[in-house]
Amino acid sequence: MMISFEEASKIIGNAFRQLNLTTEKIPFDKALHRTLAEDVLADIDLPPFNNSAMDGIAIRFNDKIRKWKIAGEISAGNYDSYSLDENSAVSIMTGAKLPEYCNTVIPIEDIDVNGNKAVLKDSAIFKIGMSIRKKGSDLSKNEIAIPKNTYLQPRHLAAAASCGKVELKVFKKLQIGVLATGDELIPVDEKPTGDKIRLSNTYALLASINELSMTGINLGIVTDKKELLLQNIAEALNSEIDILITTGGVSVGKFDYVKDVFEELGVDIKFWRAYIKPGKPIVFGAFDKGNKTKLIFGLPGNPVSSLVNFEIFVRENINKIFNQPERERVKAVLQNDLKKEDKKRYFMRGILIKNNDGIYEVSSAFSQSSGNLVEMSKANCLMIIEEGMINPIEGTEIECIMI
C-alpha cells in the first residue's frame, strides 16, 4: 500500500530514534563534526586568574589621581609581583596576570606616557574595575563548558582544550553500507558498450554519507539474479553495518527482486512506496540482529530518485539524531510555471538566487527526469511542491531546501 510523504517521514523518524547509538573516546583534535556524548566540565576556573583585557596600565583605583609613576611591566606569561600604592602603576599587556590589589586597567590610548610617568588624558574617563577579565568570569571550576549532544565545531574544540580535555567521548559514526543492483551497471573505470551504464548512485550516496561525518561502505554491484541478491544482502545484514541502502530493483518489474529478498531474509517491511516524486518506489524496513536493529532502505535505481530519497529521508534524520545543522530551508518566489498534475509531494530541482531586494527567487529551466544526474548537478535546491498544489505558476511562493 502506498503511503503519504508525511506518513513515511514519521515512520522513518521513529525508527531512527530507536537506534542504539554507542560511544567512543577519541583525541579532542580529531573530534571536529562529531557529536558529544557527555558534558565537558571546566577543570579549573576560566580564566584562572584576573587578567588585563587591554594593553595599558594597571592601578589601584582612586578617582582623585590622574598621574602615576610606572614601577615596571608585565606581559602575558611573564608575571612579576609588584607592591603598588595609589600613585604607582605597572605597564601591562593584554592577557597578563594582574598584580595583587590592582583593580583597574586604563587603556594605553587614554594615557600619555613620558619615561616612567603616565598621565590620564583630559578626554579620558576611567572607572573602577574597567578592562579586567576576572577569574572565573567565563566559567567556574566544574561548570559545563560544552553540553552533551553538541555537534562539535572549531570553537568547541578550543573550549575543550581550555578545559584540559585531551580526549572527548562522542557518539560513534553510523556505518552505512551501499549496495547497487542492476544488470546494466558497470564500474566507473570501464567504458560502456551496448546497453551498459556506469555506476553513479553509489558514489553520490557515499559522498553524502561522508558529508554527514558517517562511515560509508561500498558493497559493490550485484546483478538482478535473485540468488546473488539473497547472498549479497544476507552478508550485508549480518555484517556490522547500522544502515543498509540498496539502489534499484524495488519497483514492480519482472526482475525487481529486492523487496522480496528483504522479506525472505527477515526484514520487517514498514512500508513500500510513498506518494512522492521522484522516488516513489522506496522500501523501508528494519532488521533485528541480536540486540541491534538495522535500518533498511531500498531506494530506486534512478540516480536522482535515490539521491532525493537520501536527502529527505536519511540525511534529515541523521541530522536530527546527531544534532547536526540541518539543510537550510527558505521561501522563494517561483520564476516560471511548473507542471504538476497529480497530488504527490514533489521535490523538483531548482536554481535559487537572492535578488537585489534580498528576496529569494527560484527557477527550474531544465529537465526534471529522475535519470538525469547531470541536470541534478546544476541545481542548488529542491523545490517542495506540496500535495495540494497543482501546476504552480510564476509568482507562487514555495519552500526550497538548499542542497
Image: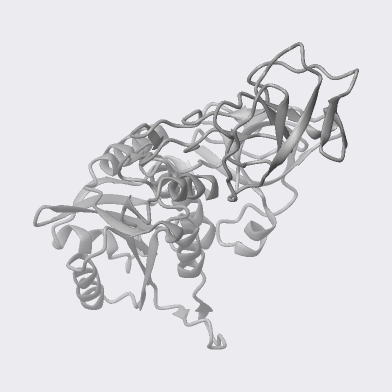
Residue 80 position by quadrant: top right
| Residue 279 relative to residue 385: left or right | left
Question: Which of the two residues, 78 or 205, is positioned nearer the viewer here?
Answer: 78
Q: Is residue 225 above or below residue 64?
A: below
Q: Is residue 251 visible?
A: no
Question: Which of the two residues, 392 or 221, is positioned nearer the viewer here?
Answer: 221
Q: Is residue 397 visible?
A: yes
Please name the residue shown 43% across and 47% down the image: 160
Please name the residue shown 85% across and 26% down the image: 119
Q: Is residue 277 above or below residue 51?
A: below
Question: Which of the two residues, 1 or 163, is positioned nearer the viewer here?
Answer: 163
Please name the residue shown 20% across and 77% down the image: 227
Please name the residue shown 81% across and 38% down the image: 116
Q: Position of residue 28 (x, y in %)?
A: 41, 56
Residue 124 position by quadrant: top right
Q: Position of residue 195 (x, y in %)?
A: 52, 81
